[in-house]
């Protein structure tokens, strides 16, 4: 069984991604999920935000609980981002970038969140999966 913090993090990721896909189509603008794996911070921006709003949301990013961390974000071209910032785009036409977000908790349980370009929901696996698995 997953810890409460792992469940909380999983719900946040899954809910936000589904909402981002819906909002991008509804608002007809680009939305972006920004992730900094090495500090386990995530935040959302959109193309209509001012410079002040962009700075404010980055400063108030969702910080994962101390017992949960982002391992990396993987892309289909074999890029794996483990440090620095990476972005996942959600576009006006209803599609998104393809990516897998990998997290791990203090019990070494790993979860993978697969974001498919044309599917509205995120697929979660209770293990570390890669493209091609």
Image (cartoon, grey):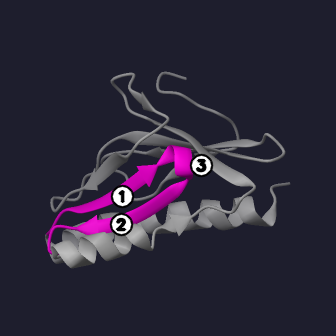
Residue at 16%, 67% in the rendered image: 47
State which quadrant residue 93 falls in.
Answer: bottom left
Q: Which residue is mark 2?
A: 44
Q: Is residue 17 visible?
A: no
Residue 124: which numbered mark, if any?
3
Q: Are marks 1 and 3 in contact (CB under 8 Å)?
A: no
What is the quadrant of the C terminus in the image? Answer: top right
Q: Position of residue 3 (x, y in %)?
A: 81, 60
> Callout 1: helix, strand or loop?
strand
Mark 3 crowdedness (10 Å alpha carbons): few <14, some 14-19, many ≥20: some
Q: Which of the marked residues, 1 or 3, is nearer the chain's N terminus?
A: 1
> Callout 2: helix, strand or loop?
strand
Q: Position of residue 41 (x, y in %)?
A: 50, 58
Query: Which mark is in front, 3 or 2?
Result: 2
Cα separation between marks 2 and 1: 5 Å
State which quadrant residue 79 falls in.
Answer: top left
């Amino acid at each position: 069984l997953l810890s409460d913090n792992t469940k909380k993090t999983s719900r946040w990721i899954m809910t936000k991604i589904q909402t981002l896909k819906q909002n991008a189509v509804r608002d007809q603008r680009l939305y972006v999920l920004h992730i900094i794996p090495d500090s386990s911070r995530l935040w959302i921006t959109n193309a209509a935000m001012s410079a002040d709003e962009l700075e404010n949301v980055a400063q108030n990013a969702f910080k994962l609980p101390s017992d949960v961390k982002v391992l990396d974000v993987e892309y289909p071209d074999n890029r794996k981002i483990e440090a620095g910032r990476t972005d996942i785009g959600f576009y006006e036409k209803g599609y998104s970038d393809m990516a897998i977000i990998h997290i791990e908790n203090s019990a070494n349980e790993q979860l993978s969140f697969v974001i498919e370009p044309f599917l509205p929901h995120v697929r979660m696996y209770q293990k570390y999966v890669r493209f091609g698995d």
